[in-house]
Image: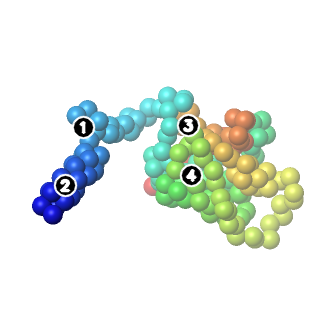
Amino acid sequence: MATQVSGFKLSAWVLAAALSACAVPGPGSAPTATPPPASGSTPAPDAPVATTSLVGTEWVALAIHGAREVTGSKIRLRWVAADQITGTGGCNGFRARAGTNLATLQLGPMSSTGRACLSLPGSQEDLFIKALELTRKARLERDQLILMDDAGKQLVRFQRAAPSR
């Protein structure tokens, strides 16, 4: 009986030691945090950018689908939280969930105000909303934000809006 108890205690001790070894990081294995880019600097093109760095920023659309210039733009996008955007397509306001990494960014589901605007299919607002739905990644280039599809084709190019006073 004493042998069984001693064997049980030894087994329990070995199991506890093995489990505690898994929980304690060894020397040099502590995770390292990547410092945020300095103000005004642009991260390397392939560096993953967390959307937390965009919280509180507002963007004005310059072009939709790579070449079509946005005229009289009231098309805006605001990052209100790391995982949420709001904005306007020019007439209707919208809100959507957002991924938390620009390299794998997806937007949606999206909700919109549905005002009775005089915007026809193919209008700037219509093209903009469709582009948001197709977004699968994004990148920052200085003061511009580019939304892209799966293939890396530019969907919308934004300019950072001047901070409101």
**Label 3 belongs to which residue?**
140
Q: Amino acid at mark 2?
A: Gly
Q: CA distance from mark 2 to mark 4?
A: 52 Å
Look at the numbered disc 2 and give the secondary structure of its residue. helix
**Label 2 belongs to which residue?**
7
Q: Earlier in the sequence, mark 2 or mark 3?
A: 2
**Label 4 belongs to which residue?**
99
Q: Residue at x 19, y 59 (%)?
A: 4
Q: Earlier in the sequence, mark 3 or mark 4?
A: 4
Q: Earlier in the sequence, mark 2 or mark 1?
A: 2
Q: Earlier in the sequence, mark 4 or mark 1?
A: 1
Look at the numbered disc 3 and give the secondary structure of its residue. strand
Classify residue 125 as left or right of residue 78. Answer: right
Q: Point out residue 36 in the picture as x, y percentages from the top left corner.
A: 38, 39
Nearest to viewer (mark 3 / mark 1) = 1
User: Within 10 angstroms of label 4, few (less than 14), some, or many (20 or more) residues?
Assistant: many
Q: Point out residue 45 in the picture as x, y percentages from the top left corner.
A: 54, 29
Single out the residue that lies furthest toward the front.
Answer: 1
Residue 26: mark in rendering: 1
